[in-house]
Every structure is written in structure tokens, then in C-alpha cells.
Image (tube, helix red, strand yellow):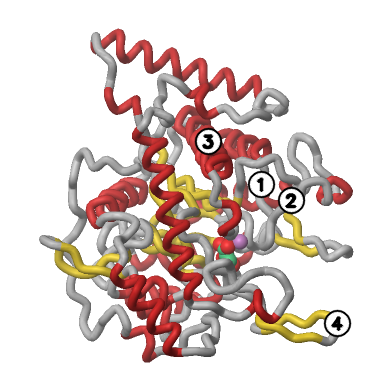
Amino acid sequence: MMRVSKQKIPGKSATKVAGWQPESWQMRPAAQQPLYADSDELNRARRELSGLPPLVTSWEILQLKQLIAEAQQGQRFLLQGGDCAESFADCSSERISNRLKVILQMSLVLVHGLQRPVIRLGRFAGQYAKPRSTKMESRNGIELPSYRGDLVNAPEFTPTARRPDPNRMLRGHARSALTMNFVRALVDGGFADLHHPEYWDLRWVDASAHAAEYRRIVTDIAEAVQFMETLIGEPIASFSRVDFYTSHEALLLHYEQALTRQVPRQPGWFNLSTHFPWIGMRTADPNGAHVEYCRGIRNPIGIKIGPTMPIARLLHILEILNPDDEAGRIVLIHRMGASKITEALPPVLEAVRATGRQVLWCCDPMHGNTETLANGIKTRRFANIVGELEQSVDLHAAAGTHLGGVHLELTGEDVTECMGGARDLSEADLSRAYRSNVDPRLNYEQSIELALRIVQKLGRSKK
Ligand code: PEP
Ligand code: CO
């Protein structure tokens, strides 16, 4: 992660924000928050968390903002991916390195095919809180609080497991720190060395339907690296590592607040729990607590846009979050669904384009395409995921905007959660290795296939 080579600090705006404090969100309606029964216990946990070291630094955040500003100009592509929700139990070396490997492999495919550098942004090291459609869940006449992610409670359907426990914020912070520590060590220790993409191989690469195509790309890149180094006459240091950034949904605001800090020699406040927090579809309310919280931090911010988001509301949120139109500040992540995107996306693109604002457009082809099968299993069809992505490329081209990134739910594991793909996973296959507690993720093979499909659609060097 995150060596800062060329420190160009984007605009100095958003450094002092009128009427804002890390806790000012508490004066606003806060959707999707758990009800903690014991406020003393909550205060103790928050106080302890506020005194613990942060997970990222302000200069890494500003560096990412600069890279996003370049992506807004079409010079980079953003690949954001990871689990729908991390779980405390999955904080293991194998899971973390597999997830890193699949993102690295996808980014190789994208760099090679798009001929543009890729910003690698994991959904990890803090993606522990989830929005839910209902506050309570009923089973056999028993009603308990919904599972809101490991940062809040546990998934088992018992009163003890489902009790929102503020001390879980401390465990979440510790797991995030363990994850970050391992990722940083891997990245700095040569794991992400372009001279050795074989380090990124997963056990199941060779069994993949795309193995040959992937190997061809790796060989191409190895030859290009060798050619450049021969030309220059020495090893090129920047080939020995790649940057990784982290992101999560800024949902549980007590957690985000406790990790919101000021730093020496930098004005303003930073959320130092992650480089890139995003506002989920269910909390994107200009009068709500989440927008109020994000208004005052200097991190780049993602905003999810669903098909029911009124355009006036989106424009209002943009005005609140980025009054000075600072470059690199805003990433708009649309998640309309394959069947709705042709109708829902063009008016949004047109309205934002008309404001002249600098934004980075990303497509999340996952969350508008979730379906529940008759047996109650949640899945997504690969064809719908690809379909939404391909349509979004065309709709951007027609609107005079450009698709600058993707937001995906994926895992390096060999799971069977999404249907379709090269192996054409069927409904019957889903029960074989379905592991997600929340949304279904692309498995390794489907992820690589998707990267290849993105390249096919976006083509070389087109913005
Ligand atoms: C998510 O990204 O996991 C999520 C809940 O997305 P959205 O807010 O777009 O529904
Ligand atoms: Co999800």
C-alpha cells in the first residue's frame, strides 16, 4: 500500500467546513443505526476507539484523491472490489491474500487491455457494517434485531448474538488493523512485484476456462517490463510494487466518528479508518446524518445512486459534499440493474453533466441485479452483471460522459454464489459452495472473466 511518490495535493478547499464537527451528524436523522441498549457501554467503547491509532494516513488519502482526479480526466481506471461484508471469522491470511491476488490479476487484465493505469481499491479493512431492509427479523414467531454486520452484532439467530454490542467496534478496528498490516506487508514485501505475477496465482487458476488468456496477458506484460528495463538499462523500481487503497461503506457513524481525526500540518478533518468511505443507497439523504458526517471530512467520497434517487436530491448532495467542485472528491457509483439502466441512467448523466461538475462515474453492476430464488437463496446472474456494465458504457458514450471505474462484490475463493459465467453455474450449483452471509459474490473465475469482458467492451485506450 500506498507509498506516496509524487505528492500533488488537490485543491485546498473543504479544509474548514462551516458548522461541522465530527459529532454534528448526531443532530440529524440517522438511518440504519443499531439501537444500543446501554449508553454507558457505548460511550466507553467510543472513548477507547477514539484513543487508538488510525488505520491510514492523511497523505495516503490525499494521494488517492489526486489519482481519482486523474481518473476523472480519463487517465486512470478505478477497480473497486471485495466482499459485500467482511466477517471477523474471515480475517485469515489465506482469505486476505486470495482477495488481493484476484484484484491484482483483474487489474493486470485491465491495465493491459485499457492501456491505462488502474487504481486498486479494496472493499476491506472495515467493510463490517451492513444496511438492512428491516430493523427486525422474524423466524417461527420469534422476533430479533436484524443482523447488521459483524461491527454491530452476530448472524446467528439468538438474542445474545443479535444484541447490538458497541464493543464490536473495537474488535472491528482490531481486525481492520490486522488486515491492513498484512496487506501492507505483502505489498511492500514484493508480493505485488510485476516481475513476479506468478506470486498472485491461486490454486484454481489452471482449472479456469480463462487460464490461457490470462497467461498470455501475463507473458505480454513480462515482456513489456523486460523491454522497458533493457531500454533504460536498469530495473525500474516502480514495477516492484503497486498501490492498494481501502474503502468501506461509512454506515455505522459512531465508528466513523471515533476514527475522524486532525493531523499535524494539515488543515481540516480526515476519516482515518479508510481511504475512501462511501455513502450507501439507503443513506444518501441530503438532510440525513451520513451526508452531514461526510460533508466535513477531506477524504474522497463515493455516493451510490439507485434507480429511485430523485435527480434534485443527487444535485443537492453534490452541492453539500463538494461546494467548491474540488477535483478527486466525488465518485458517483450507479447501481440501477440491467433491466432499469437504459431508463434510469441517462437523465442522471445529463443532469450532472449540465452542472459542469468534476465527478468520476463508476458502475456497480451487482446491487441492482440481486434476486432471491424460490428456495430463498440470494443470487445474481453473470449475464445481468455483464449486461448492466456493457449498457452503462454505451449510455455514457451517448451522454458525452465516460465510465471510469467499476465497483464489484467478489472473492478470491472458489465459491458458487452467482449463476452463469464460463462454467455456467446453475441454481443446483449454488448450494455447493455458498458462503456469503449477505450478498452473493463473483468467484475467482467469474471475476477474471468480467475483467476480460470490460476490456472487450471498453477497448484499448478509449475513455
Ligand atoms: C453494498 O455495496 O454492499 C450495498 C449495500 O450497496 P447499496 O447501498 O448500493 O445497496
Ligand atoms: Co452488497
Q: Amino acid at mark 4?
A: Asn
Determine the residue positioned at 50% across, 66% down: 304
231 vs 126: above or below: above
Determine the residue positioned at 72% across, 53% down: 435
The x and y percentages for residue 220 are: 49, 17
434 on left or right of 129:
right
- Which one is in front in this view, the residue at disc 1 or the one at disc 4? 4
- Which one is in front in this view, the residue at disc 1 or the one at disc 3? 3
Give the total number of marks visible in the rendering: 4
Q: Earlier in the sequence, mark 2 or mark 1?
A: 2
Give the Cα distance between marks 2 and 4.
Answer: 26 Å
Determine the residue positioned at 32% across, 85% down: 24
User: Residue at label 1?
Assistant: 442
Q: Is residue 321 among the parts visible in the rendering?
A: yes
The x and y percentages for residue 58 are: 24, 57
Q: Amino acid at mark 2?
A: Glu
455 on left or right of 29:
right
Q: Amino acid at mark 1?
A: Leu
Location of residue 102 (image quadrant): top right
- Which one is in front in this view, the residue at disc 4 or the one at disc 3? 4
Q: Describe the element under mark 3 as helix, strand or loop.
A: helix
